[in-house]
Every structure is written in structure tokens, then in C-alpha cells.
Amino acid sequence: MTLTELGDLGDFLGGIGVIVTLAYLAVQIRRNTQAVRSASLDAVFTSHVEFQRTVWADPVLTKVWFDGMTGTTDLLEEDSRRFLFMLISAARLWENSYYKARGGTLESTSWAGMHQELTGVFAGPGVRIYWKLIRNMFSPDFVAFAEGAVRARTQPK
């Protein structure tokens, strides 16, 4: 075997090595993407459950939340402030989920149910009153999305 043939064999083996390395990296990237999505879903659900637990564990907060959402009862000043902060927290959860879904780290199937639930909350007559007070705290992109989703939900079909 000549030196040229050995060089050609080395180039061939090097090419195979590159292909094997790229295949290995593709598998690792896919696994990493799945792990990131799983962690993202876990974080979103944990935040969501913690918010719910805080509200549902306290009868006063539960009443404030539902009275504020429906808008059927005038809230006392103190309860109005409580509801406002709970609404900001709920909107942050929705915004976080929205950006994760848009960025691809939250699966569309997981996002769909959460989106329906949050759209239902934000479509409440009481929420729409308070939303006007806090909407400027959120990114314009999210505000446009949220208001469009609520509009689509509340418009007659």
C-alpha cells in the first residue's frame, strides 16, 4: 500500500468518524430537547398548582377569586387589592406558558388545555375590569394574544 492509498484510507475513515459523530450528536440533541420540554412542563404545572393551592386553601381567597372573576359582587377595597394581585399572578403564569409554547419548550397539547382554562378565567366579566388596570405590566405581544383569545372566546358563534 502506497502512502497515497493510506492517505485516502485515512480520509475515508475520518469521513465515517464525522458521520458517526453527527449521528451521535443528533441523538443527544433530541434527548436534550425532550428533557428541556419535560422540565418546562413540570415548571409550568408546578407554578400553576401552587397558585391554585394558595387560592383554594384559603376560603377568604377562594371567595375573593370567584367574586372578582364573576364581577357579580362588589369587592371591598382590601379584597379588590387581593384580587388584583392574584390576577397579576395568574396572568404571569399565562404569559410564561405562552412564551414557552411559542418557543417550543412547552408541547402544544399541554398548552392547549392550559390556554383554555386561562382564557376562561380572563373572559370573566370581573377580570376584564381589572385587566384594564394591569395590562400595561405585560409585553405588548402577550397582551395582543391574550385579548385576542378572550375576544374569540366571548364573541357569539
Image (cartoon, helix red, strand yellow):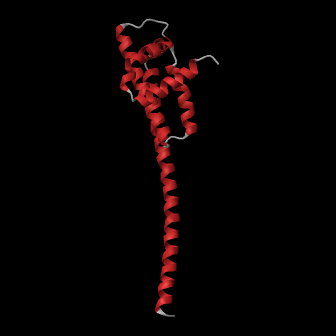
Q: Single out the residue that lies furthest toward the bottom.
A: 1
Q: Nearer the viewer, residue 124 or 62?
A: 124
Task: Say if 151 sits above or below 38 in the image.
Answer: above
Task: Say if 72 sits above or below 55 in the image.
Answer: above
Q: Residue at x 52, y 54 (%)?
A: 30
Q: Residue at x 50, y 43 (%)?
A: 104
Task: Say if 129 sits above or below 92 in the image.
Answer: above
Query: How many marks can you see?
Result: 0
| Quadrant hosting residue 80 | top left
Residue 27 x, y percent position in the rendering: 52, 59
Residue 6 x, y percent position in the rendering: 48, 88
Residue 70 x, y percent position in the rendering: 50, 12
| Quadrant hosting residue 137 | top left
Quadrant where the image shows the C terminus: top right
Q: Residue at x 49, y 58 (%)?
A: 28
Q: Which of 147 and 119 is in front in this view?
A: 147
Task: Say if 152 sits above or below 14 in the image.
Answer: above
- Horizontal side, residue 45 vs residue 136: left or right: right
Q: Nearer the viewer, residue 62 or 147?
A: 147
Q: Which of 111 and 152 is in front in this view?
A: 152
Residue 112 x, y percent position in the rendering: 57, 33
Q: Residue at x 54, y 20 (%)?
A: 151
Q: Single out the residue that lies furthest toward the right.
A: 157
